Image (cartoon, rainbow, N blue to C red):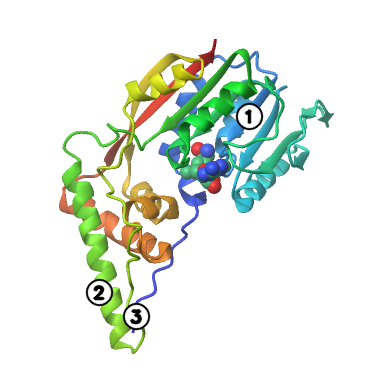
Amino acid sequence: MVEVVPVNTTYEPFSHEPEYIEANRAFILQQPLAHVDRFLDLACGTGTISELLIGQSPEAHLNGVDYDPVQVQLSADRFRKLGYEVRIGFDLTDDYAGGKPVLVFGEGDAGKLPFADASFDCVTICNAIHLIEDKPALLASIARLLKPGGVFGFNTAFYSGSMPEGTDRLYMDWLRRATVHISEKSAALVAAGQPPIKRQRGTTRKAFTNPWFTADEWSRMLADVGLETTERNVRVVELSERAFTTVGAYGGMAEVLLSGFPVEVASEALQVAAVPAMRAAGASTVPRNYLEIWTRRV
Ligand SMILES: C[S@@+](CC[C@H](N)C(=O)[O-])C[C@H]1O[C@@H](n2cnc3c(N)ncnc32)[C@H](O)[C@@H]1O
């Protein structure tokens, strides 16, 4: 019998983890945003960041964009439950309904958006900038969409420096255990007369030697498009066993750490291996560094 482990590979479960919400809240609260009339939340996912932004300026309008239609729907549902009128698309509306601003969520690529120049006072892309292939194009597009003096902020746990010193052994052991899980699963499939699990050739990226940017490299790229760094901070987030397990199950993480394997298999393996790796290292939490940058359009 091949063991079936329930695994949710979407980002949704991790987006409810208290450590995650608090880290993002602290990041958003760093920036005075009460004056903002119009937000743009790129790669908005389930709307966690959008909700934090609106909390800072409750009268403001907000557009959220994600290239995954499921996430767009999750964001829309979230705000409808909170009593907002939500439209789907890319309108820059000034409408209010029931005393609240109408919010708009659209399915699209963060780097290629149909909005007019200088449409927004504040643009964010949280926990996602590392996923965007053409970063200079993304940053140029953000600078174009911001009003002069407008602010752009992002945070990421995938940059050069995101693994606190001393945690690399735990991370490597996690990957080793996950790979063993996949081998055992593959052997069980073969024994049951099914094809083995194969890692696709040519797609494997080295998980921990990625060309992730340093904080200085980010500031230089931002300056190149006229975005001046005003705040730069490293936040250490301590992940509990549950949060570490949940983030392991997230397909976006599995694609980076065990690229080439079918994503459901990789997610399951990282989920299963998370707690054993922590316990073997005697760690009750796993620290992860989040780089946070706020900039102003000059
Ligand atoms: C880790 S989630 C972060 C969601 C949200 N920003 C948050 O911090 O809770 C990453 C999101 O980026 C989205 N995404 C990845 N690449 C994208 C792109 N090129 N354009 C728009 N969205 C993208 C994914 O669909 C996913 O919803």
- Reading the image, the residue beneath label 1 is 40
Q: Are marks 2 and 3 in contact (CB under 8 Å)?
A: no
Q: Are marks 3 and 1 in contact (CB under 8 Å)?
A: no
Residue in the picture at 35% in, 82% down: 195
Residue 56 picture location, percent across and down: 61, 21
User: Toward which corner of the image does residue 286 lie, by quadrant?
Assistant: top left
Q: Earlier in the sequence, mark 3 or mark 1?
A: 3
Quadrant in which the C terminus appears: top right
- Reading the image, the residue beneath label 3 is 2
Look at the numbered disc 1 and give the secondary structure of its residue. Answer: strand
Look at the numbered disc 3 and give the secondary structure of its residue. Answer: loop
Neighbours of disc 3 within 10 Å: few (<14), some (14-19), many (20+): few
- Reading the image, the residue beneath label 2 is 184
User: Toward which corner of the image does residue 199 lie, by quadrant?
Assistant: bottom left
Neighbours of disc 2 within 10 Å: few (<14), some (14-19), many (20+): some
Residue type beneath disc 3: Val
Horizontal placement of 227 versus 270: left or right?
right
Relative to the observer, which residue lies in front, 44 or 277? 44
Q: Can residue 62 be seen?
A: yes
- Residue at the bottom extreme of this rendering: 193
Q: Distance between the residues labelled 3 and 1?
A: 45 Å
Q: Earlier in the sequence, mark 1 or mark 2?
A: 1
